[in-house]
Image (cartoon, rainbow, N blue to C red):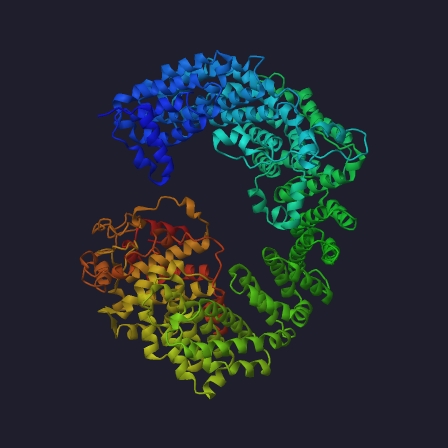
Amino acid sequence: MAEATPEITLQVYVKALENLQNAYEILHTPYPDFMVESTKMMVSPEYPVEIRLKIGILLKGVLIEQWESIQPSRKVIRELLLNGLVMNVSNMPIIELISSIIVQIICLDPSHIWPNPLIELLNWMDDFNAIESSLELFLQLFGRLSETNGEQQSLCKEIVPSVLEKGFSIFAQPELNEKLREKILLLVYLVFRSISFADGTDNSLVNKCLDSTFQIWMSLFLSALQTSPKSHIFIKKLVLKILIVVFRDFGVYSRKSLSLSLIPVWKFFNSITQLYVGHIVYQIDIEHIDSLFSEESKELPQTNYRIINLQNDIEYKYLNEDDDYDNHIEGLCAYSIELITILVTKPALYNLIKFGTFPLLNTLTTFLIATKDQERQWVKDPSYFILNDEEELLQKSVRTLALRLINDIIEKYGDTFVQQILMVGEKLILNRDEKEFIELAQQIISKLNFQELKGQQSKEFDQDSVMQFMKTSAIYVSNSFYQKSFIQKRKETGYLLLGSFSEDIIVFQQKHESTFDIKKCMQNILIELERQNSSSLQARAIWSTTKYSELISHQFKELLVPFFESVLNYLKSEYPITLKIVSVKALGNYATKINKYNIQFQYKAEIMDLILQVLQEASQDQIIYVLESTINLVRFSSILATTLAKNGSKVLLSFFSIFHTESVVIKQFNELIMRICQCKDAYPHIFDVFCPFIMDCFQVFYEDMNKIQDKSKMKPTDIGLMSAIMHLTSIFIKYCSDNKAQEAFINLLPSMVNLILINEDPQLQVHTSQCLKNFIIIETGQILKMNLVQDVMKVNLKLLEVPQNSANESASLFAGNLVMITINNLLDGNPDINLLKSVVFKIYRSRMPSTVQSLVLVYARMIIEKPKESINFLTSWSIDNRMALKVLIDKWLLQQPLFRGKGTKNATFTALMKLFLLKDKTLENLLVIGYNPSHQNINSDVYAPFKILSLLIRCLDNEVTPHTQNNNDIKQEDERLEVEDDDDEVIKKDQFQDQVDVEIEKIKDDEEQDIAERFASLDPKEKKDKGLADLETGSTLYMSEFLDFNQEVGEECDETTEEDLTYLKDPCLNINLVDALKEFFQNLVKNDPDYLKFCLKNLLKEDINLLQKYIKLNF
């Protein structure tokens, strides 16, 4: 076959470049030496650079793809590429291209091939002109190796010592330019990252790589930090990044360097505070920063270069990362804090840091000063660093890094450091003189016992050095042009400091006597709020008061009303919207405390007029804050509720029209409407505005729906709007307080009933059925008068239908609630048989715990009132050859641990106690899903009384000792509670039937026999019925931790169900579940010990152990 001559090779590439879409197919030529010729052409200076670059880019992909198949040509290509580096010394685009190809080949080749060639390249760097070319290859190589987590260990072991040694010798050359020094340091950073995986796991590799040069490099790093902070900024930044890797990732190897590095790093940390304030806070040009701290009175030149040029930034080029900081000085400060954070948390430095936390904190507060950029951002978005603490800590900035470090130090050094926070915070807020503060600090530091440091590695760390740190941590702007601004920035920092760590401060104040007077601090804020300060300072001051509002209202009640009145002034039109938002949020906070502690305060109508103006000015992101606070204000003042209804109903209606699809906003909006409607004086005003809108929308929607035969073709936007309107209507109906409103809504009733019957949208069904339920509660007589009882029954049965699409199950969320109200109000408490059967069938086919809960509640209340009659009814019919009693009890016991709400739990557990005490023979013979709710529950059935008893025991334990479990850190479950995947093996037959070994006396044979005979003769182990297995397979709801009652404490109750039970005057609402359960078990022990013993013998040991924690078993 013909050889690929240069002419043929060039022609192939021309063709490929003309047809880039098929370039790779074109480059798969039949010429055996095509890759060699292509490489020659790319590295040869004889061809134009532009052509060589295009050839190289195409060649790179094809060469790597075919590398395994071109065995004979590999050695030649390697040599060509290495020689290409030599031949193209001055041509960096070509060098970069060749280096990238070599790096990819190194990663494909066996590791033994490359150490010698790479060492030769290192030696070639003795030629000064070749340094940059060789550096390019090694930068790309270690950039790749640093991402592989040790895939090239043997290669690293062979070349890293030489790379670090050669790098240091070149770096030390005085004629080397700044750019090459930066590249060498970046290479060192990549080298350290490449071998960091081995620290603590392969220490021999780390030792071999670092032993020969580590100390000299560390000396160089620390020396670099001692030079002027304004010089070689990028080099210092790289040094910090290297030191971060050293002390973070080489915890084992770097231990001996910790103490020696602490003081130089700390000195550098203090030295850059002026750089930060001048260049980052005020954006002053570096050359003029000194004038900011001298006795001058002029404005200084602003910097013209803040944004990094990524094209010329070697970090971005070789690390392929952007550190998110505007310029290298900000990055320098950020990495300094990160390095200090690593050192502070090292156990080996605990004693040293303990004596220096005061000056460390003083320095950190400088990095808390808000920059111009942050203040501009605050104007656009108040949540940026005032409204939401969590959002603030997620922001990547020097300020947030400093806050995190302070938090870390609190966790490590506790009350001592909190006391220092109080002192520094007070200094900043009161703008105390730094010299006086240094003298105070000296008195405190002189009392420290530095004798404890004897024997520590760092001999330089003593009282004098700590005082020196304290002196160099102090910073004050002397240029009079900036003094007023700086004082306000200091105060804002002080408020931030005291507010951010308010919980620690309050706890400290409760435990210790302190010279810091919180009351005086709050009084100073009141004074500050009367002054003409910057908006950001006032906002931060207001924000900080909310952090102490609980303490204020408890101990300094007299301050709360003045705070309310003072902050109220900031709602006036002359202030920016962001300050108004912060103020509204604070007012809501104050109102909650005023109500909680019964503080006398007369709300004036003008308050709501001001808040209404803010609500209209706020953006969509800000509205949520205004709504939350308005809810609190309306809750506690009928005057404010009535004012809002009178003057703001039209505004609220327009908000509803705009935001009804925004779930977060509409949730708060609906609660606000509910609070207004709860006020009888406010209701007529808001009703007059909303009612015509509701009626018009309902009529238009109902007419449109009747015109469309296929309801699935209804516009989602229309359905969404109508669903929101139905939710709103439900609120108005629920709190309907006059005849006018009742008459208006009565006209909706027939159409509403029909809407439920013809509509299939789940959300619309839920809200419309809620409306209907509220109608039944307030207008029972009208429904009877209009002969709509049968229509209401149809609605009940409609909601109890099993939808073809299981996703529509949510439509029946409150079906049980509607059934209970219907039976109580329209059927005189006598349930309809078909309705009751439909409830069980719906339970049988439902998977959502919230749906099952409301339906089970129907039967729980029946069982409490008429237990025997209920059992008889449920045993008289079946579903799919399963007795209705079994269907109900199976699902009930399976999902009982998921039921929420005090009333619901009280009723359902009371019903279970009734069932257990009933000792009904049918129930005792009933087999239900066993202790393990596995989807493949064949042969895991147990008798119903055993399962009921187990649940009651676990309920008692859960209610007595509620606990929170993090779902991301769930402990390993007991074997009996493990849930297997659907494809796992069937559970062993005897897994759940083993009797437990507990210290209970053996029951006499005749007693045991007498009780046992009441249970079915069929051994549960031989049971063939799968229970609900065929329905529940694939459901993700029945995880084992649910049956362990490990639900979050304080989980929000189902308020709607609780309200309905209250309306029904359910007797279980007011019982104490713990007391009821204890009484239940105590009565069993006393009155029926034999039956209890028999049942306990068939439970798991864990259940019995739990019961013995609370009930003394006298057997």
Quarter of the view holding residue 485:
top right
Q: Residue at x 49, y 21 (%)?
A: 254
In percent of width and height, residue 415 lies at: 62, 36
In percent of width and height, residue 1092 lies at: 31, 59
1079 versus 279 height, above or below = below
Is 118 placed left or right of 518 in the picture? left
Count of marks, rendered view: 0
Q: Residue at x 57, y 46 (%)?
A: 391
- Of residue 44 and residue 425, the one placed in the foreground of this image is 44
Which quadrant does the N terminus fall into?
top left
Q: Residue at x 75, y 45 (%)?
A: 520
In percent of width and height, residue 317 lies at: 49, 30
Residue 515 seen in this snapshot: no
527 versus 252 height, above or below = below
- Of residue 780 and residue 824, the one placed in the foreground of this image is 780
Residue 542 seen in this snapshot: yes
Is 558 placed left or right of 839 in the picture? right
762 versus 240 height, above or below = below
- Of residue 614 and residue 118, the one placed in the foreground of this image is 118
In percent of width and height, residue 899 lies at: 41, 61
Quarter of the view holding residue 290:
top right
